Image (cartoon, helix red, strand yellow):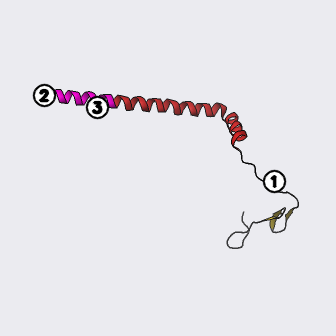
Amino acid sequence: MRQATIAVAIRTAESGIVEAVRTLLIRAAIIAAGIAIAWLFAGRRISLVLDRVMTVRFATLPTSPLVYDDSFRIGELSMDTTGPTGNPSI
């Protein structure tokens, strides 16, 4: 008799835990779906707001002179277009 009572108590506790986990997972899925839908409809606006709040300002580099002579040169920055073998990269 006592073993049957313990078994019923264990099953009841397990079903309570399973129900709690199920509820947690369902809520998490609903929240994730809500965030995804909000991002699809308002992603541009959300990203613009986040850019205003969290954007780090960098120094503006000059863009002149802009020269190409087997490599690009923008201002004082030279950008080589050859690959590791010396051939031009496409």
Q: Residue furthest right?
A: 65
From which residue to which does the magenta span run? 1-17
> Which residue is disc 1 drawn over?
60
Magenta stretch: includes residue 12: yes
Image spot of residue 13 (x, y percent) = 28, 29
Left or right, residue 3 beside residue 17:
left
When asked about the image quadrant of residue 1, the answer is top left
Judging from the image, what secondary structure is the residue with disc 2 in? helix
| Circle 3 SS class | helix
Mark 1–mark 2 distance (CA, rounded to whole Å): 79 Å
Q: Please name the residue that numbered disc 2 is placed on.
A: 2
Query: What residue is shown at x 75% (from left), y 66% (from top)?
Result: 81
Q: Is 11 placed left or right of 87 in the picture?
A: left
Q: Earlier in the sequence, mark 1 or mark 3?
A: 3
Q: Position of residue 25 (x, y in %)?
A: 43, 33
Residue 15, given in percent of the width and then of the height, sits at 30, 29
Measured in 3D between alpha carbons, the distance from the residue under mark 2 to the one under mark 3, in whole angstroms, is 18 Å
